[in-house]
Amino acid sequence: MNAPDIEPAFEPQLSRPSRAAVMWRRFRRNRAAVLGLVLFAAVVLAALLADIIAPGDPLRRVGVPLTAPFVDAATPLGTDQLGRDILAGILHGARISLLIGVVATLISICIGILIGAVSGYFGGWVDDLLMRVTEAFQTIPSFVLLLALVAIFGSTIGNIVIAIGIVSWTAPARMVRAEFMSLRRREFVDAARNLGVGNVSIIFREILPNALPPVIVFASVVMATSILMESALAFLALGDPNFASWGNMIGQGRAVLRTDWYCTVIPGVAILLTVLSFSLLGEGLNDILNPRQKK
Amino acid sequence: MSLLLYLLRRILQALPVILLIIIGSFLLIKLAPGDTVDALVGDMGGADPAFVARLRQEYGLDQPVLVQLWRYLVKLAQFDLGWSYVYEQPVTKVLASRLWVTLLLMLGALSSAFVVGVALGAFAARRAYSATDNVISTLGLIFYAMPSFFLALLLVLLFSVKLNWLPVGGIRDIGAFHTGWKLWLDIATHLVMPVLALALIYLAFYMRLMRTSVLEVMELDFVRTARAKGAGDARLMFHHIMRNALLPVITLLGLQISTVLGGSVVIETIFSLPGLGQLAYTSVVKRDLNTLMGIIFLCSIIVVLVNILTDLVYAWLDPRIELK
Amino acid sequence: MTDAPILEIQDLRISLPAGGDRPYALEHLDLTVNPGEIVCLVGESGSGKSLAANAVMRLLPEPHVHVSAGRILLDGEDIGAKSESEMRAIRGDRVAMIFQEPMTALNPQKTVGWQIDEVLRLHTDLDRKARRARALEILGDVHIPDPASAYNAYPHQISGGQRQRVMIAMALVLNPRLIIADEPTTALDVTTQKQILHLIKEMQRQHGTGILFITHDFGVVAEIADRIAVLRLGELVESGPAEQILNHPSHPYTRALIAAVPALTPPAHKDLSAAPVVLRAQGLAKTFAARGGLLSGRRQAVTAVRDLSFELRQGETLGVVGESGSGKTTVSRIVTRLLDADRGEVVIGGHDLIHADRRQLRAMRRDIQMIFQDPMASLNPRKRVVDLIAQGPIVHGVPKAEAHARARELLSLVELSPAAAERYPHEFSGGQRQRIGIARAIAMQPKVIVADEPVSALDVSVQAQVLRLLADLRDRLDLSLLFVTHDLRVAAQLCDRIIVMQKGEIVETGPTAQVFADPQHPYTQALLTSIPGRDWQPPKLTDAA
């Protein structure tokens, strides 16, 4: 070609850092996100090591009731009014919190993606119908619905997880719908249709991968609220009584708040840090997946 | 005139949603193992089967579910929400006596959270990435991650247990028999901590969103135009940036109203405030299903009304939206 | 012209943040604007031309991007030495700016009047009444039909051309010494562009204002420039009087840029009457319905296309030309059935595409392919180039390995290196992405290719390359093209025949050379006279061609 040499022909770059390396570099730049990762790792570690550091049932009595922290080496974080080890409660509680966070989030995101994608892609009466249902779910105060669901189906851990998933899918659904509505107008979707690609393929192979990044970031928010909801249920003594839960520890600690505040504060801080770690991780993920020039 | 038409249209639009909610929750409650009669009989410590059957008939619980649903809807159309056997009163009466507490709590919490959150968010954005911004943003993150009940207990620990400034619970001092402005002052004192506990958490939401929103609007072309006209920083912020940046915050306010109502369950229970939230909790625990239905219905109406209100505010802020 | 210069830029250097692909956005820029003079700063994207404008206003995103050497003198005073409050007094008063996109450059929440009034409030002591009178007067000066109602309108309530008039009114209201116009007509239709350029010239003559006019379009330059400065990647390559640069450019880059401007001389008429018809459109119509019923807001029905018929023959390039709102884009979507037409038929190879059922449609898709406008948006960012090109054939049953091998061959056909196959779209420049889009269309071996504004998002030099590639492929592969464009210069270069559309209807059709030489319909005539720089014939530059 004798075109003016303004746009160079494609020149392959010789060394290119891998995708993962690029992402990690972006993530690392955000110090808060790194802190989030460390906190998250600590929670995961606590959940994994619960049976090694504090073996046995965390709900059994192990020492003198209301021992203050750092007094007895056997119960380093003290005991509650029933003589249960607070450290064991914290470690085993981490399991419940993580389980609830991960599974309930998966449930709500899956429902959300399905409804949002169909609604946003097809539009028309399908969209109208699904959006009325979404509005209905959004209009009922989610915590009241959660109370009702748990009261009706019983407070087992499985039911609680499903109930939390059911009350929190609306926000992801709206988000996915908005993404789909804007992406389905993009030319690459027209291009795929023009090639003869079918609807299902367009939804899941063309649009969904492009709609996912903000949803993944939002999943961290859903995870945080799921944990908060479970702990609030447990605080109100509506959690699963067979498992140690941070919320429940706070609920019980409330009775001795005036004298032995640590029974409340230690699990409270545990929830706070766990939820904080998700928020921070979410921000880090946002930096990775939606890179913007930081000024 | 167009405003009236708009309101009418919005209310008509909300009807199917509310109907969906009522039918959905009615059927859901019918799924519950045990009905009102079971709960009643349980309270009485058992009764003979004939009596139980008569009770069922009296409450219409022997009918097919769809017939019960139809009867419920017909009564609802006459603003009759049924009978609360726990309070021995019509549900409407129970709800009416508790509505104002929840409204007061929400109004206080949301307005303070909104005003302070928006101001702090704009302030942090203007000084983005400075030490001030870092402090504000970090505090925001912490309150964002704080369980409301834990925050409430911390407030109790500080203001009631340590400082002994504020009452631990209740909506008024029962023994004092205050009247007039003294009564209102008493109520206000009782509401300080509950409002604070709810407000601080939502404040963090609004602040974070406002900060991002302001940072985004700052980059827009018309802000550059205003700068090129010679406008100073304060003028840019108040006349050009803030009003535009408020739009997503208003949207969030509308979307979150039902979450805030849900949050009042925990807060009202902790501070023993006789509002709808506490009522929801006790009716779940005591299986007062008529009352629970009534609460869901009332809350839905509140949410719908607040949503219409936020849409009006949005349209007022953004002339591109036309109320039709 | 004997006055002292209004603006003198001396040896200006603007530094970029460390770690970018180049340390300076601009270097060694010297530029002078005299009273009553229009100086055009010309360059492609990335040349640093807009940063130069912001530097004059001292509106660079400091400290990341900042002036690191040189001086900017406004009426002999060094701008760099001014305090921020002194600068605020200068901005809007002595120097004003007009931006590219009049929709986003105006605050959507304030009325037009409020925004003009703000300039007066900031820089004068006039009372409210006097300010209002002045604002109405200036709105009249820029020929806004009804100043009083425009004063109270919000920006979204007036048309794009009117908005740009408002921007100009806002810039002129205090009679500044210097106006910086940053691509002020790029977002406008040609006929509106002509009016706005005319207005800028008129205002400048009346007030003796100096104008620094930033643009990428040599047609516009030819229309208004007194003097020209050409920028390339932050370097001033050439400057001088307009006549000299336009007709006798000396620097190779300027020569290349000017050579890339499509000449307004249509190709010689090809006789295709013997060639078979590959696509016949008959009575196409599309109305975007008023949506909603009793419960939701109603929108007006818009007729995008009414009763459209045309034929495309084998090996022919048929141009569909029109301004925004003419329905030309709707045509490209209906013909490919990305949008369902209300009426009419599109016959390809004996089958009607419009009424084809699902299975027929799928099979027919391979016969009609599309090249899209935005090379950024039309390639799925999460797919490798080879997958993008091979996707169509695979969907239609070609084995994966074969489709991939063919895709790699196509890459060299569109002059991309085979190494491009494994990359993702974001690693390519705009022109390269458009080549990928072309390869994707050709991979299906279609009977017809519909190209919807395929070069309008590209820089002029890249545009020339892509057009040349398209023409080359068309001739080699005997392709039939339906070419939708708003740019008459581009149409003139490539199309054998053109259809001129206005408000959803064909107003004129015929061989390109004939329509250009002797337009019959008044709208076609208006379009043709609006082409910026139509009186300037780009010189034949032998070395660059």
Image (tube, rainbow, N blue to C red):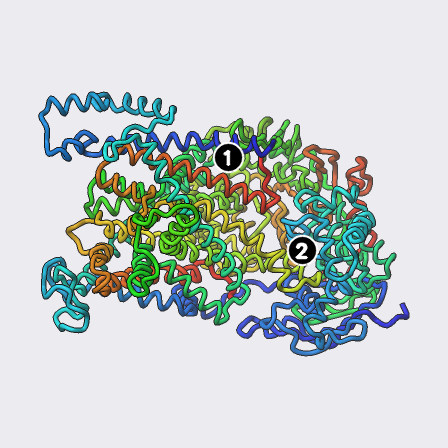
Residue type (three-letter) at the residue carrying disc 1:
Met
Q: Label 1, on which residue? A: C364
- Which chain is home to disc 2? C
Q: Secondary structure at mark 1?
A: helix
Residue type (three-letter) at the residue carrying disc 2:
Ala
Structural crowding at the residue carrying mark 1, measured as other residues with C-alpha within 10 Å and reported as few (<14), some (14–19) or many (≥20):
many
Q: Residue furthest bottom?
A: C69
Q: Estimate the x, y position of residue B202 in percent, counting from the top left.
A: 41, 54
Q: Are marks 1 and 2 in contact (CB under 8 Å)?
A: no
Among numbered discs 1 and 2, the one appearing first in the sequence: 1
Image quadrant where residue C232 sits:
bottom right
Q: Estimate the x, y position of residue B285 in percent, counting from the top left.
A: 22, 41
- Which chain is home to disc 1? C
Q: Quadrant of the C terminus of chain B?
A: top right
Q: Estimate the x, y position of residue A127 in percent, counting from the top left.
A: 44, 35
Residue B300 visible, this orientation: yes
Tell which of C284 and C108 is nearer to you. C108
Image quadrant where residue B28 sits:
top left
Q: Estimate the x, y position of residue A3 in percent, counting from the top left.
A: 66, 61
Tell which of C443 and C259 is nearer to you. C259
Structural crowding at the residue carrying mark 2, measured as other residues with C-alpha within 10 Å and reported as few (<14), some (14–19) or many (≥20):
many
